[in-house]
Image (tube, rainbow, N blue to C red):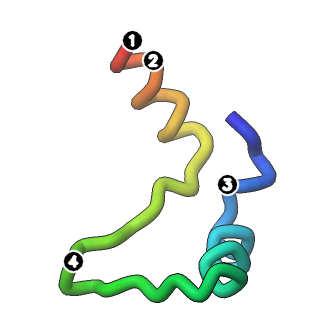
């Protein structure tokens, strides 16, 4: 897991760079906690 993409600031920066706007009504969210991501990956496989 690359920690450089695992922060709210970096996620916001990437979204802004590419002109992506999230819609709360669509339930759009991003997993930015590295530990949680690692747990999900370990449970999946």
- Farthest-out residue, front: 18
Circle 4 or circle 2, nearest the eye: 4
Q: Quadrant of the C terminus?
A: top left
Image location (x, y in percent) of residue 13: 72, 79
Q: Quadrant of residue 42?
A: top left
- Asked whether 23 or 41 is in front, the reply is 23
First reached walking from the N terminus: tag 1 or tag 3: 3
Q: Which residue is mark 4?
A: 26
Side of 10 relative to 8 (left or right): right
Side of 23 relative to 42 (left or right): left
Up-down: is 43 above or below 1?
above
User: Is label 2 in a helix, a strand or a loop?
Assistant: helix
Side of 32 relative to 44 (left or right): right
Side of 23 relative to 26 (left or right): right
Pointer 1 and pointer 2: residues touching (CB < 8 Å)? yes
Q: Quadrant of residue 35?
A: top right
First reached walking from the N terminus: tag 3 or tag 4: 3
Q: Which residue is mark 1?
A: 45
User: Is label 3 in a helix, a strand or a loop?
Assistant: loop
Q: Give the Cα separation between the discs numbered 4 and 1.
A: 28 Å
């Amino acid at each position: 897991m690359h920690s450089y993409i695992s922060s709210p600031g970096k996620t916001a920066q990437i979204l802004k760079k590419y002109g992506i706007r999230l819609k709360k009504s669509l339930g759009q969210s991003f997993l930015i906690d590295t530990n949680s991501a690692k747990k999900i990956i370990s449970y999946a496989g």
